[in-house]
Amino acid sequence: MSAPADRVPATRAAVRSTARRRPSRSLETALLAELGGDVLVAGMDEVGRGALAGPVTVGVAVVGAATSRRMPRGLADSKLLTARAREDLVDPVHAWCADSAVGHAGPEEIDRLGIIAALRLAGRRALAELAARGRVPAVVILDGVHDWLSDPEPDLFSAMLVPDLDVPGAPVPCPPVRTQVKADAACAVVAAASVLAKVARDRIMVDLAPHHPRYGWEANKGYSSAEHIEALREDGTCELHRRSWRLPGLGGPDRAGGIDPSGEDVAACEDAVSDDVLDDDVLGDDDARDTHDDGFASHDDGFASHDDALATHDGARTSERRPEGMMVP
């Protein structure tokens, strides 16, 4: 039976929407050739920076000289894909890259450290997972213009240094960083990292949604939306909100690293638009109908379910770390 006329399979929608935005392997292959030897190049991207609740999540994917030049079909910046297309890409991405990991920093850590240091913490946790498996990249391609992964000058920002991580026997690795504007759209390994980060964080927010149903996290994933803002005004925050931020209608001190979630600054964050708005905006109304049809699989244990591996490849375990301070009541 053919699909209804007003329904477009998500994979076709994603291909159509990103046909002119397909990432390439030019940068990563150039770096591999320049470095030579048996080295790994990593791509890294973050998601959740502009959210009002939940963790900030950083994905990292690594490739080497032996990595296939054929990227997973439909690979693109996660923001240009439907939720179903992103889910469908997870297994192909794991099969394609040499290794991958996802790190999180929870809302309590964001409030305590600030958003930039929390991003650094999440990124270092992801890299520490790789290091624990003997996968240390020679360079990290980081999306954007600002290197939030490397340590700041300790004499100026000593309070923002990443604390020790709970990864036995593994250092806190920080390879050299190469920043690249729009790397998540132009560079294949960064696009892969963006997909893994987005799917991992979305799953967390969907798992948490039943415990805090008034905020609508199953749809808005903790970002600003009419339903989320109205719930904040009527019911206030819960322990998973970034309480040091100027949340809509609540006020409070701003430690969001220059981001005001209640104003125009949040709109400038590339990940600050919830899926229901993003899909209408980028993919069109018809394609957007596919986005949340099936949702994500439920997990009885909430956050604990993310201790399991996302995937196993080359005998290595790719795990999603539980953000500190994010407990399901």
Image (tube, helix red, strand yellow):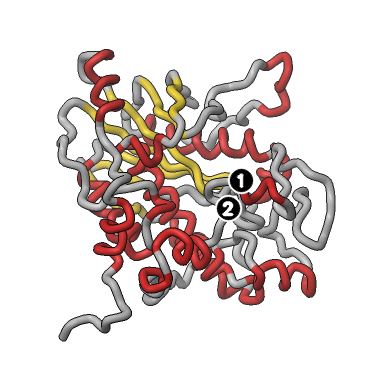
Residue 221 in view in this figure: yes
194 relative position to 22: left or right: right
Residue 177 pos. (x, y %):
45, 22
163 relative position to 301: left or right: right
Residue located at (35% from left, 30% from top):
42
Residue 154 pos. (x, y %):
68, 16
Q: Quadrant of residue 17?
A: bottom left
Q: Quadrant of residue 61?
A: top left
Residue located at (15% from left, 86% from top):
1
222 relative position to 276: left or right: right
Residue 50 pos. (x, y %):
61, 49
Residue located at (60% from left, 59% from top):
223
Q: From what the image shows, is residue 290 above or below residue 43?
A: below
Q: Secondary structure at mark 2?
A: loop
Residue behind mark 2: 272
Badge 2, how many Cα within 10 Å: few under 14, some, many 20+? many
Residue 128 in view in this figure: no
Q: From what the image shows, is residue 268 above or below residue 25?
A: below
Contact between marks 1 and 2 (CB within 8 A): the answer is yes
Residue 231 pos. (x, y %):
72, 72
Q: From what the image shows, is residue 240 above or below residue 151?
A: below
Classify the position of the C terminus by image quarter: bottom right
The one nearer the camera, 233 or 6, is 6
Q: Secondary structure at mark 1?
A: helix
Q: CA distance from mark 1 to mark 2?
A: 8 Å
Give the number of marks: 2
The one nearer the camera, 280 or 131, is 280
Residue located at (27% from left, 14% from top):
35
Return the mark for residue 268: 1
* Residue type of the residue flagged with mark 1: Ala
* Residue type of the residue flagged with mark 2: Ala
Q: Quadrant of residue 295?
A: bottom left
